[in-house]
Image (cartoon, grey):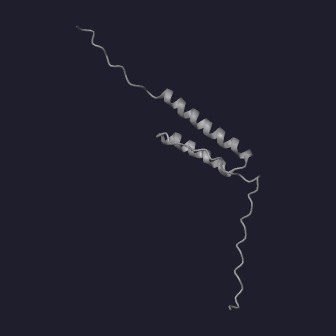
Amino acid sequence: MSDSMPEPAPAPAPAPDPADPAPLGVSRVPTGDTGVDALLERLADVDHLAADGHLEVYEDVHRGLRDALTALDTRPGPQPVPHNHRS
C-alpha cells in the first residue's frame, strides 16, 4: 500500500457572469475591399465590450461604410469613347 494521498480533483471552472461581455457569434465574410474588410473586422470589438460600448463601435463602422460608399460616387468612371461621325 502506498502512503501517498490521492490527487485532489481539479476545481470546476467558475460559471460565467451574465453581466460579462460574450461573443455575439456573428460571422464576417471578407468582401475583397481592404477598407471595408477592416471596418467589418472592427465589429469583432463588440465581442469584448459591455453592451453600453457597442454603440460607439457600430457608429464608427457605419460612418466608415458610408464614407466608402460616398467615395464610390466621387471616383471618375470610364471616360466615354469619342465617336467619329464620319461615314
Where's the N terminus, which quadrant? bottom right
The residue sitting at 71% across, 74% down in the picture is: 9
The residue sitting at 56% across, 33% down in the picture is: 67
**Is 60 situated above or below 19?**
above
Q: Position of residue 49 (x, y in %)?
A: 69, 50
Residue at the far left in the pictured view: 87
**Is 10 situated above or below 66?**
below
Q: Nearer the viewer, residue 5 or 38?
A: 5
Q: Position of residue 77 (x, y in %)?
A: 42, 25
Q: Nearer the viewer, residue 11 or 33?
A: 11
Left or right of 43 on screen, residue 34: left
Where's the C terminus, which quadrant? top left
Residue at the far top in the pictured view: 87
Left or right of 71 on screen, residue 43: right
Q: Position of residue 71 (x, y in %)?
A: 51, 31
The residue sitting at 71% across, 46% down in the picture is: 53
Q: Position of residue 78 (x, y in %)?
A: 38, 25
Q: Quadrant of residue 8?
A: bottom right
Q: Nearer the viewer, residue 16 or 8?
A: 8
**Count of picture labels:** 0
Left or right of 48 on screen, residue 74: left
**Is 1 situated above or below 36?**
below
The residue sitting at 62% across, 47% down in the picture is: 25
